Image (tube, rainbow, N blue to C red):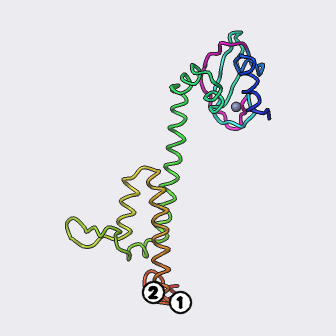
Amino acid sequence: MLDKLKLFTNANAQGMHAFEAAGLGVAPFEFVGVLHNEGSSCDYCGTRISLECWIKGAGGGQFKVGSDCIRRIGDAALAEAHRWDHGRLAHVAALRERREGAAKAALRAWIEENRPALALLPHSRGHKHWRTREPLTLLDEILHGLIYESAPKVRELAKWAQARLASETEKNARFFPGQNAMGCTAGPDNG
Ligand SMILES: [Zn+2]
């Protein structure tokens, strides 16, 4: 892999476009578009990339670089074209959607595993059911968050809920040795 920093420095010293200094083509360079290709690599720095940003030199030759290089190379026009490219935006949106789905699925699975214990703990802000006025539980609170919150919030919620359950379980173990968070005595059938 080439030394990224050294290439940037060389290009600046020579007053030459970094891609030209690296022998990729002749400036000015034009942004062509992106191509999703897992396991590809950047022609400039050699880093593994999954989104190829194709660039055309004044001589007509084309090459591909990663998003980091196109943003940091010091070519504002290329960076801006990359930033607003619809193919790139769709790619980022799809990645984000996948991550959000994964975060929510993980929390949902954790809730299912801990449902009985969560149903016995109170809502952290003491909320009550709007109609029955019954106190809501931690299970209600987390399910509500799972449905209505965005993925970053859901990740926070998952961490918070896990810490809360752990601390309640620990508290119970301290005050009621031999019982779990559900108030059941640990045993072969209900441990
Ligand atoms: Zn690169």
Kindly identify the amino acid type of the residue bearing the numbered disc 2: Cys
* Residue sitting at the far right: 1
Q: Residue at x 54, y 41 (%)?
A: 95
> Marks 1 and 2, Cα distance to the nearest angstrom?
9 Å
Amino acid bearing label 1: Gly
The response on whether ligand 1 sits within 8 Å of label 1 is: no
State the residue at coordinates (69%, 25%). Answer: 64
**Residue 88 placement (x, y as % from top left):** 55, 30
Residue 2 in the image: x percent, y percent? Answer: 79, 32
The answer to if 114 sits in the magenta stretch is no
Counting labels gives 2
| Above or below 172: residue 52 | above
Q: Is residue 60 left or right of residue 164?
A: right
User: Any mark on residue 184, and which?
Assistant: 2
Stretch of the chain drawn in magenta: 26-42
Query: What secondary structure predominates along the stretch shown in magenta?
Result: strand
Q: Residue at label 1? A: 187
**Quadrant in which residue 32 is drawn:** top right
Residue 142: x and y, percent?
Answer: 39, 63
At mark 1, the secondary structure is loop
Q: Name the image quarter holding the N terminus.
A: top right
For disc 2, the neighbor class at 10 Å (few under 14, some 14 to 19, many from 20) is few
Query: Do the numbered discs 1 and 2 sit on residues whose CB atoms are within 8 Å?
Result: yes
Q: Quadrant of residue 20?
A: top right
